[in-house]
Amino acid sequence: MTPAPRTLELFYDVLSPYSWLGFEVLCRYKKLWNINLQLRPSLIAAIMKDSGNQPPALLPRKAQYLQNDIRLLGQHIQVPIQLPKDFFSVILEKGSLSAMRFLTAVNLEHPKMLEKVSRELWMRVWSRVRTELWEPAWETLDGVLTLPRTISSILVLPFPLFTGLLVPRLHPLHLLPAVFSSSQDEDISEPKSILAAAEKAGMSTEQAQGLLEKISTPKVKNELRDTTNAACKYGAFGLPVTVAHLDGQTHMLFGSDRMELLAHLLGEKWMGPVPPAINAKI
Amino acid sequence: MTPAPRTLELFYDVLSPYSWLGFEVLCRYKKLWNINLQLRPSLIAAIMKDSGNQPPALLPRKAQYLQNDIRLLGQHIQVPIQLPKDFFSVILEKGSLSAMRFLTAVNLEHPKMLEKVSRELWMRVWSRAAEKAGMSTEQAQGLLEKISTPKVKNELRDTTNAACKYGAFGLPVTVAHLDGQTHMLFGSDRMELLAHLLGEKWMGPVPPAINAKI
């Protein structure tokens, strides 16, 4: 009998590009490792303030470095992340309070939707590729054959579809039909943008609207504040923060680049940021 | 016939614990990957100043985090690194100017010794298990006399400036020269990404030696 799954908490904010990278890696591994992944929507701005830290992009050389780092990591980790040139003004001016309150509401009422809605919000801030062209879910062969949007990928790309080795497909832009998307960097502080993200994630308009109406309620505000405070209590000075609960010990790991170390702590196998799906436990 | 090895420059300072971790991983992989590893002793204090950055340990929560992070990474990467409780005062008060000038002199006169002497210095700063690097007393003495010469001072300054030109705001910095492009990677935690850029296989921070090219 397998031992009890270990709990991992992932504190994240959609305003944080590195949070997206860490999120995708952990979502892939939650099917492969004996873990229970708890997503914890948080506010990075509040964590910065509480810890006395500053966003790295405020230092010119770090801002310069981040652009390349995120681009390269996006390619390596296969996440369609693209920092617009003015990415830092996106962070500063728009903020993420509404978006993170919305995700908090999703977590309270429809927790199973949290992963998809989070992903849609990141796509809106940090990607120019529409979600229907990038399918991050691990699909069975059945799924590939029945989803019409992926058929163009079968025709266009030489992927080894029948080997059982399926990876998230990031379609090369030049191979796509003309109906391909334009820029996605839409304002996630706008209610209509949040609604659009929720609907794209599979929520009905009614569900999404209902949750949007709740984002200013004390319950949601308090929950987001409590989650953010929990991250601070763990010692966070930024995001993403992964907290692993192991054998009575708590390990706080900062950054999207501590996943191999996490594997080591869990006694699990690290197979890179894009692990093969065939090892998935059924 | 194998293609020409790709040049990697590793800018480091013995005052930087993460530099030691990155250094050890690259030293292991230089036998396994088709690379030419060039060690570039630099001054982290000068890079901080030039970039306007500050040592992370100045922020209390980062200082707290670093202690655990380095301990866990040391175990995972199998480097006997131990941060003393007052590690930050070690950094602030002692500095590394003499040590890095010494390594610069080693690099100028006995470059094949640079790896071992660097490791020995790290061991002295960050580990309680000091080893001997195998340098004779005369060699060491001669080098100590040279560390304040203009040649050595200039070389250290030039190397540090090179790191700054690559965009460094801290150390370690690994610069990979690939197909006419230059990639600057910051931190000891970009080695798997480096493997991806090189088209080489990442086998974790402690790769098996049996894959070594003979």
Image: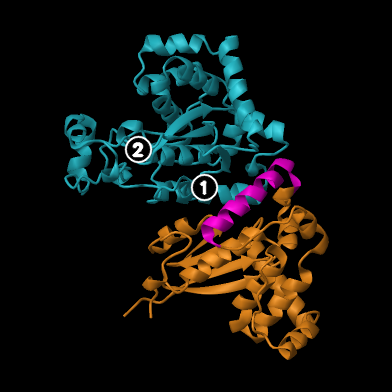
Chain colours: A cyan, B orange
Measuring from the top left, give residue B121's x and y in whole percent. Answer: 69, 71
Q: On the image, which quarter does residue B213 sit in?
A: bottom left
Chain of the residue where label 2 is placed in the rendered structure? A
- In whole angstroms, how far apart are the C-alphas of marks 1 and 2? 25 Å
Task: Give the residue at x 51% y 48%.
Answer: A257
Can marks 1 and 2 be said to lie on one chain? yes
Quadrant in the picture for residue A24: top left
Q: Where is residue B50 in the image (x, y as percent from the top left)?
A: 73, 58
A220 lies above or below A129: above
Residue type at tag 1: Arg
The residue at the point 44 percent across, 41 percent down is A81
- In the image, what residue occupies the spot 46% across and 21% down? A193
The amino acid type, in three-letter code, at marker 2 is Thr
Q: SS of the residue at dot 2?
A: loop
In the depicted view, which residue is nearer to us: A67 or A159?
A: A159
Q: Can residue B188 be seen in this view?
A: no
Q: Please give the range of residues in magenta.
A: B58-78
Q: Mark 2 points at which residue?
A: A2
Q: Nearer the viewer, residue A199 or A229?
A: A229
Q: Which residue lies furthest to the right in this view?
A: B93
For residue B132, above or below residue A256: below
B201 sits to left or right of A160: right
Question: Could you say where residue A65 lies in the image, as x and y percent from the top left?
Answer: 58, 51
Q: As drawn, is A50 to the left or to the right of B167?
A: right
Which residue in the structure is indicated by mark 1?
A: A258
Left or right? Give the position of A42 relative to B36: right
SS of the residue at dot 1?
loop
